[in-house]
Image (cartoon, rainbow, N blue to C red):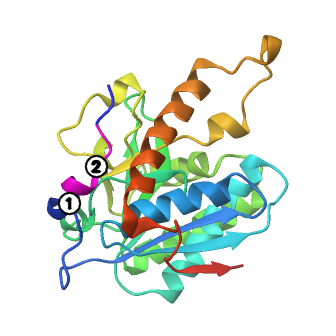
Amino acid sequence: MAVPFPSQSDLASRSNVAGSASGHIVAFFTTDSIYESEARRMIASASRLGLTVSTTSMQSAGSWVKNASMKAEFLLEERKAKRGPLLYVDVDAVFHRDPWPALVDYDCDISVYYHADGRLAGGTILINDTPAAHQLLKVWRNRSNANQEIWDQVVLQEIIAEDEQSHKPEYRVKKLPVSFCWIFDRLENGLPETVYIEHLQASREVNKEPRVFGRISKRVARRRERTNDIEMILSADQRTKPLVGNESEGA
């Protein structure tokens, strides 16, 4: 099912063109965790396409779910600080091509991907520079802070659903195609014609259950094989050595 990760020879037709319309790509990660190396891989994949990712390091809140709940606060601050479209991407992702040509004309406040079963996926989120987007982030931040044991994307889905069912909806929401939240071994993802962003599911490592005789699950094994293949391609690309170079800041 895997779409090949682009090699150096594929980059010319996939990269950001100087002067073309774009926005800000942002991400955060917790310090002293596997997400630091995930961030380095993501930055490397973006750099080779001429993309800049602003990454922010943050102290762990104590659990994976609580760390995820910091997303709304982080995005609200980023939305206040930056003008133009804002694209949030989880750091355990890699870029296959420049996403902006497909996103800059999205006429909405926020755009998110929904799985086939209707669950919202918060790994890639487009947030436009609109008053309604700012307000949505405030509501999301407040609810996440009040419910830190609830997964951030569950909270966001509830807010959007409530607004859609209201007498006068406030938010314009557009659904992202799977090509912006593609997972190589998820059958429902299929084989999209174009992949922009691939998510590598680091949560499989963080939340994995103990296995008999130390064996790892098939899902973890598939992830490790995929990330190894991608890192081999990135390491072979001299323009991405060392795997750093984009904006990074501490919280």
Question: Mark 1: which amino acid?
Answer: Arg
**Looking at the image, which residue sits at the far top?**
212
Give the image quarter of residue 114. Answer: top left
Instruction: Report the front residue among 218 and 10.
Output: 10
Which residue, given by chain and number where applicable, does mark 2 sit on? 6
Q: Is residue 58 left or right of residue 237?
A: right
- Is 217 placed above or below 175 here? above
Point out the image quarter for the C terminus: bottom right
Q: Are marks 2 and 1 in contact (CB under 8 Å)?
A: yes
Question: Mark 2: which amino acid?
Answer: Pro
Numbered circle sitting on residue 176: none
Q: Is residue 89 visible?
A: no
Locate residue 105, reporting x and y percent.
19, 69
**Looking at the image, which residue sits at the far right?**
62
Q: Report the magenta residues as a range.
A: 4-10
Residue in the picture at 62% in, 74% down: 56
Residue in the picture at 61% in, 28% down: 220
- Is 238 placed above or below 185 here? below
Locate residue 106, reporting x and y percent.
23, 65
- Pair 2/1: label in front: 2
Residue in the picture at 57% in, 61% down: 39
Which residue, given by chain and number where applicable, does mark 1 sit on? 14
Locate residue 137, reporting x and y percent.
54, 69
Element assignment for label 2: loop
